[in-house]
Amino acid sequence: MEYKNILLTVKEKTAFVTINRPDKLNALNNATLDELKHCFNAIKNDNAVNVVIITGAGEKAFIAGADISELNKLNTVEGKIFSEKGQEVFNLIEKLGKPVIAVVNGFALGGGCELALACHIRIASEKAKFGQPEVNLGIIPGYGGTQRLTRLINSGRSSEMILTGDLIDSHEALRIGLVNKVFSSEEIMSKAIEMAEKISTKGQIAVRMALRAIVSCNDTSESEGQNLESSLFAICCGTEDFKEGTLAFLEKRKPNFKNE
Ligand code: COA
């Protein structure tokens, strides 16, 4: 598939996905969602990729939401399809099986905030702004935001953001646990790459098993989750990486993981 709205590059085991519609503040139109779906499916099956970094092109925005010029034409039936399509793509990101880091470099509004929420780690630049302003348009978040935001920052804070439509800055986002870290615009990408490279040095079977257990929290009870955790732990115990990691510790040297 030829990408017209996103950029994909792979460097040193990290895939960089950039939403590339800066003149529309990287608003997610239908074509961009199709490209994201294709791109994340390709990344999922690409053994050369350990970690993904996703960001927005230009100086102003991560993603300023779903494309309102497409939104305003929807009827009831189309609205359901529209919402489910976005949910499907964002679920693909959340369940990719590889860590996805959102580098939120500007406005992350509506579907943009929801996409960041579907990622596993969110870091923000000083000038990032987060919000779910859908109520201003007479709609509600439709790409998983009511669920993921509420789980992440609690129902009181999520209700305030979704019901007022107010935007918050990156420091408030950090305070309420919406993002992990805040950096200046100049350093944010190098910090994200540093984090991605650090994750890449670990045994990738363990990284993926850990991620699977973490993501399962959304769909399972505590006891089902712990059952899954012990099964995934057991799988790790059967790997060469486990033997190497523990032996390296005992021999006081760095492990040489082979991801097997
Ligand atoms: N959908 C479609 N186009 C969008 C968009 C969106 N969600 N957000 C921004 N754009 C477009 C604008 O229409 C404008 O296009 P134009 O130059 O062809 O007129 C361009 O991006 C720049 O946006 P502009 O509004 O001029 O920038 P600004 O700095 O004055 O304001 C925002 C920035 C983010 C505050 C403002 O664009 C905004 O409120 N966007 C909508 C956010 C939203 O409601 N998202 C949720 C959608 S469900």
Image (tube, rainbow, N blue to C red):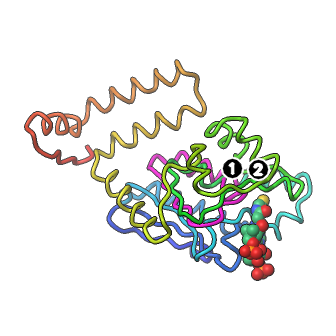
| Residue pointed to by mark 1 | 87
As displayed, is residue 116 above or below residue 25?
above
Circle nearer the N terminus (1, 2):
1
How far apart, in angstroms, are the residues tagged by discs 1 and 2? 7 Å
Highlighted magenta segment, given as a residue range: 86-113
Q: Residue at x 81, y 55 (%)?
A: 134
| Residue behind label 2 places its C-beta within 8 angstroms of ligand 1 | yes
The verdict on residue 87 being magenta is: yes
Q: Nearer the viewer, residue 224 or 146?
A: 146
| Residue pointed to by mark 2 | 142
Q: Residue at x 63, y 39 (%)?
A: 153
Can residue 67 be seen in the rendering of this structure? no
- On the image, the x and y values in percent for residue 138 come to 90, 54
Residue 143 is marked as: none
Q: Nearer the viewer, residue 3 or 163?
A: 163
The verdict on residue 165 being magenta is: no
Quadrant of the rendering where the N terminus is positioned: bottom right
Please report contact status of discs 1 and 2: CB closer than 8 Å, yes or no: yes
Classed neighbour count for the residue bearing mark 2: other residues with Cα under 10 Å, few (<14), some (14–19), many (≥20)? many
- On the image, the x and y values in percent for residue 8 come to 49, 70
- In the rendered structure, the answer to whether residue 14 lies left or right of residue 41 reads left
Tell me which corner region of the image, top left, top right, bottom left or bottom right, holds residue 129: bottom right
| Residue behind label 1 places its C-beta within 8 angstroms of ligand 1 | no
Please tell me how many numbered marks the rendered image carries.
2
- Which type of secondary structure does the marked residue at label 2 adopt? loop
- On the image, the x and y values in percent for residue 66 come to 74, 62
- In the rendered structure, the answer to whether residue 138 lies left or right of residue 12 reads right
Q: Residue at x 54, y 69 (%)?
A: 18
* Three-letter amino acid code of the residue under disc 2: Gly
* Three-letter amino acid code of the residue under disc 1: Gln
Give ligand 1's quarter of the image: bottom right
